[in-house]
Image: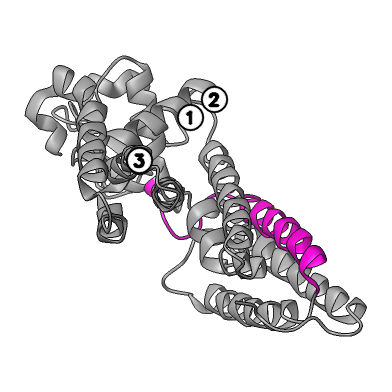
Amino acid sequence: MTIAATPRSPVVPTVVTSVIVAAMAGLTAYSVTALGYFDRAHPTALIICTVGLWLLFTLAMLSLRRMPIRPAIALVLIGSALIGGAALTGPPNTSTDSARYAWDGIVQNAGISPYRYVPVDDALGTLRPDWLFPAPLENADGTHRCLDPRADPTSSLPSGVPLCSALNRPKVPTIYPAAAEIFFAGVRFITGPAAEYWPLQLTGLVMSLAITAMLIVALRRRNLDPRLAALWGWSPIVATEAITNSHIDILGTLLVLVATLLVSRGLRFRGGIALGAAIAVKLIPVIAAPALLRRQPAKVIAASIVTFALLYIPYLLTTGIAVLG
């Protein structure tokens, strides 16, 4: 399977594709740094940038079809790094989920289960960094407002002290499964609580590049066109959601790909371990299970269930049934 035949002169399509990919990186950086956090009242600029990115992506994929395999592989990797690097030049712009990820990691590194308290509980007051809980400003009528567009007014429990919080649903316990929580704790263990959004964005970039590289290798081994890896590596939605907004789904995606490649090589028990870990990231990867159960499904099923259970044991011991969120 190939995208298209190699042209007689590869120079022109190589230059054209490179220019388009560079334009994608530039537009990605502009959308992150210049437009700020998404304003629902004025959505036009971000919508235009998003449409522009998808148009450039389409043109880049069409132009890539005309490139020889070897330079195309290099450009797929370089382009993935450029676009991904551009995506982490600014903080999240359409989601605050990574604020909760960071908070859960901070809480765990203080020796507290993330399932035990809601974020605004008074018991966690000393752990709150200013970038996640900026000080509120009081209005003339006694209400409070938050200057940070990512933060919303709330109050501490049970004291009722006014707060601003970048976490969505700060009065609700965390919903994230065990593998995700272990990942959050690991990232914050390395960076500490003061680092803002970039640690998770950087790990998102690393995982995204790893997926691109794994796809290239897997496609080549199966005599498929490795240029198809650009469908992932250059995708605007990968740059936005996996890197800029740092959604934990990227970890689940990486583990599902690992599980798929292992099972396809006959390593079903190891593949089941990776699948169980993926499901323990955000549950949704369970939809990949049917495709991995065609031969000797018992090994995959047993390994995934055991892995899922083992990842939860530390939290069950400290928090009990509250791990259900």
Q: Which residue range is magenta in the image?
A: 68-97
Amino acid type at image mark 3: Arg
Per the image, the residue denoted by label 3 is 100
Per the image, the residue denoted by label 1 is 187
Q: Which residue lies at the image location 19% right of the left edge and 28% below the top edge?
A: 117
Vertical side of 26 occupied by 106: above or below:
above
Q: Which residue lies at the image location 52% right of the left edge and 77% below the top edge?
A: 47
Q: Is residue 95 magenta?
A: yes
**Snapshot quadrant of residue 291:** bottom left
Please identify the quadrant where the C terminus is shown.
top left
Rendered location of residue 60, percent (x, y): 70, 77
Tell me the distance, in whole angstroms, between the alpha carbons under discs 1 and 3: 13 Å
Which circle, 1 or 2, is nearer the viewer?
1
Q: Nearer the viewer, residue 134 or 312?
A: 312
Could you tell me if residue 313 is visible in this image? Answer: yes
| Cβ–Cβ under 8 Å for marks 1 and 2 | yes
Tell me the distance, in whole angstroms, between the alpha carbons under discs 1 and 2: 6 Å
**For the residue labelled by badge 3, is the local secondary structure a helix, a strand or a loop?**
helix
Vertical side of 68 occupied by 172: above or below:
above
Q: Kindly report the secondary structure that dominates the magenta region of the rendered protein.
A: helix
Q: Which residue lies at the image location 19% right of the left edge and 37% below the top edge?
A: 173
Per the image, the residue denoted by label 2 is 191
Amino acid type at image mark 1: Val
